[in-house]
């Protein structure tokens, strides 16, 4: 498989960020009188952007647009202060990316995380990696699985679809990659299950970050 460009999802693929997301959301929920959730519940709340994360964390009877609009800025402000408290790259990922970079690979990030917080996270956790493009959810643009974010990365890098591998950990990532016409590798070290990735139609499955060196 010839790969020139690796496009990575962020949460659950590059970064193990679930603790900071869960603690930040639970802080906002508790402060506003709503029940909180166990850490593992957030594995299935994340992946579709901050707004849907907020909706899923609220009790069903409170998932109104007005309630989400009221609490989302509070969550974003608190998370921005605590987004790096416990977050870390998955074990083995940084040295693997350094080896791929030395071999000439390009990297990009395509995430449903708010775009504003992403450049700082990438500089902090991947200081030795040169990302060709870093894109999160931008206001006025659709979230994944809409393929626009991948199309924008391809346009900016000039990469051909046949030379691209999209790496992610959820069915949303599979649908995004396939809608954009690129191959998709399921990251089994991430937040979701092997079965979810198989059912969604991932082109290949990677057991650990070091597996990227063999594709």
Image (cartoon, helix red, strand yellow):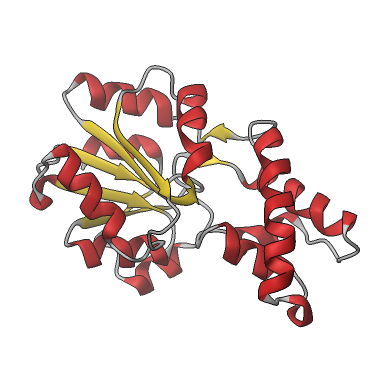
Q: Is residue 161 left or right of residue 141?
A: left
* Camera-side residue of 33 and 94: 33
Count of labels shown? 0
Residue 18: x percent and y percent?
63, 47
Residue 30: x percent and y percent?
88, 57
Residue 174: x percent and y percent?
33, 63
Q: Is residue 62 left or right of residue 43?
A: right
Q: Is residue 170 left or right of residue 183?
A: right
Q: Quadrant of the C terminus?
A: top left
* Camera-side residue of 188 and 82: 82
Q: Is residue 33 left or right of residue 62?
A: right
Residue sitting at x 44%, y 52%:
137
Residue sitting at x 53%, y 38%:
117
Residue 152: x percent and y percent?
24, 49
Q: Quadrant of residue 126?
A: top left
Residue sitting at x 37%, y 60%:
173
Please tell me whether residue 20 is drawn above or below residue 141 in the rendered image: above
Residue sitting at x 28%, y 62%:
147
* Camera-side residue of 94 and 136: 136
* Camera-side residue of 116 and 22: 116
């Amino acid at each position: 498989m010839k790969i020139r460009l690796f496009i990575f999802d962020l949460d659950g693929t590059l970064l193990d960020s679930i603790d900071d997301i869960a603690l930040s959301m639970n802080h906002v929920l508790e402060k506003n009188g709503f029940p909180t959730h166990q850490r593992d519940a957030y594995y299935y709340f994340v992946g579709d952007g901050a707004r849907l994360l907020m909706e899923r964390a609220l009790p069903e009877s409170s998932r109104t647009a007005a309630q989400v609009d009221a609490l989302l800025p509070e969550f974003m402000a608190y998370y921005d202060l605590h987004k790096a408290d416990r977050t870390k790259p998955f074990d083995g990922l940084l040295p693997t990316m350094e080896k791929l970079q030395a071999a000439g690979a390009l990297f990009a990030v395509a995430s449903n995380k708010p775009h504003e917080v992403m450049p700082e996270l990438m500089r902090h956790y991947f200081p030795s990696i040169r990302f060709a493009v870093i894109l999160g959810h931008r206001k006025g643009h659709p979230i994944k699985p809409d393929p626009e974010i991948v199309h924008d990365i391809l346009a900016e890098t000039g990469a051909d679809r046949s030379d691209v591998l999209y790496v992610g950990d959820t069915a949303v990532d599979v649908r995004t990659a396939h809608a954009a016409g690129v191959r998709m590798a399921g990251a089994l070290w991430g937040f979701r299950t092997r079965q979810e990735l198989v059912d969604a139609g991932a082109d290949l499955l990677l057991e650990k970050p070091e597996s990227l060196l063999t594709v």
